């Protein structure tokens, strides 16, 4: 079992040590596709999965979700979260145990998700239908010091509901002078870069576990594809995710690193619980 570089009290202390007036943007990898962003004292969670619900659900099936990395933190300990995203309805991105734990600890937290998923999500969570903020592709929402912009994702296709609203979406997030892109689960699709190039992304969080049908789950970018997408959208830095959580659905970051180096794409590798930061931009 992989031990996080920081967890529990140590992780909480690290998050809390960042002052509200820090000129930098700080982020932590929570495992799988989960990240915590801190800017101006406000905390945003991106697609957190902080339970063992999938391990228990699939324990006696042909798709066991055997955990590789210890959990970094119980969701009930996150008492300072203001916003949380869910890119789509798969449990490692919309986990009832995780989200209700966060909601109990941070009663004012709001959920941002694709509008097409509102009914499913609120039924799963047992929350009022007006609790989430729903976005469609190209739509935006501003709250506190964050602005969210909906970007379509393909997992494995650009699936839409009967009204043409995308069920799988990433988000470009404006935080002060920075532009973050969290794709959620996705493959590359024609025109994807056209959605993203105009944003001049500073930091992209992209999956690297690949698309292998024998796993019997929808696929994602692999390491080479993630590195090349980051380059093609002009990302200043890219951080890989969606690996080292479940034994059956993971990948080594080696291909990602080798590709980034060969195409001169700046990147950062985080370990679970580790902090990264974007330095204040020069004026």
Image (cartoon, rainbow, N blue to C red):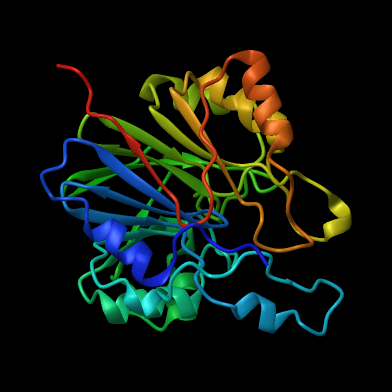
**Where is the N terminus found, in terms of image quarters?**
bottom right
State the count of labels: 0
Query: Vertical placement of 13 versus 271: above or below?
Result: below
Is residue 189 visible in the rendered structure shown here?
Answer: no
In the rendered image, which quarter is residue 220 located in? top right
Residue 79 vs residue 200: left or right? left
Q: Is residue 243 visible?
A: yes
Query: x, y percentage for residue 225?
Result: 69, 30
| Horizontal side, residue 108 vs residue 188: left or right | left
The quarter of the image holding the C terminus is: top left
Q: Position of residue 14 (x, y in %)?
A: 30, 57
Relative depth, front residue between 98 and 28: 28
- Observer-nearest of 94 and 106: 106
x and y, in percent, of residue 161 in the image:
56, 55
Viewer-nearest residue: 139 or 228: 228
Residue 34 in the image: above or below residue 169: below
Compared with residue 94, is residue 165 higher up or lower down, i.e. above or below? above
**Which residue is at 60% across, 26% downward?**
229
Residue at (21% x, 51% y) in the render: 18
**Horizontally, is 36 left or right of 87 in the view?**
left
Q: Residue at x 48, y 80 (%)?
A: 97
Taking the view exactly as shown, the residue that stands out farthest to the left is: 21
């Amino acid at each position: 079992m992989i031990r996080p570089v920081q967890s529990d009290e140590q992780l909480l202390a690290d998050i809390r040590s960042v002052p509200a007036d820090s000129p930098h943007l700080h982020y932590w990898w929570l495992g799988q596709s989960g990240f915590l962003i801190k800017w101006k004292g406000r905390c945003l969670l991106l697609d957190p999965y902080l339970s063992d619900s999938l391990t228990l659900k699939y324990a006696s099936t042909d798709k066991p979700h055997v955990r590789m990395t210890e959990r970094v933190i119980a969701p009930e300990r996150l008492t300072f979260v203001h916003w949380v995203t869910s890119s789509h309805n798969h449990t490692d991105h919309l986990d009832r145990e995780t989200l209700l734990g966060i909601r109990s600890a941070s009663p004012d937290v709001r959920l941002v998700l694709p509008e097409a998923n509102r009914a499913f999500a609120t039924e799963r969570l047992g929350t009022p239908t007006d609790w989430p903020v729903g976005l469609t592709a190209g739509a935006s929402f501003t709250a506190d010091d964050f602005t969210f912009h909906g970007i379509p994702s393909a997992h494995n296709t650009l699936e839409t509901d009967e009204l043409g609203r995308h069920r799988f979406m990433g988000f470009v997030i404006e935080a002060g002078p920075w532009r973050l892109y969290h794709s959620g689960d996705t493959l590359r699709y024609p025109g994807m870069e056209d959605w993203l190039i105009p944003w001049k992304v500073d930091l992209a969080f992209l999956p690297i576990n690949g698309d292998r049908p024998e796993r019997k789950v929808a696929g994602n970018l692999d390491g080479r594809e993630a590195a090349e997408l980051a380059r093609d959208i002009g990302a200043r830095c890219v951080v890989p995710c969606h690996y080292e959580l479940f034994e059956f659905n993971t990948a080594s970051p080696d291909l990602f690193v080798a590709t980034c180096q060969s195409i001169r794409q700046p990147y950062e590798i985080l370990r679970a619980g580790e902090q990264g930061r974007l330095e204040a931009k020069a004026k």
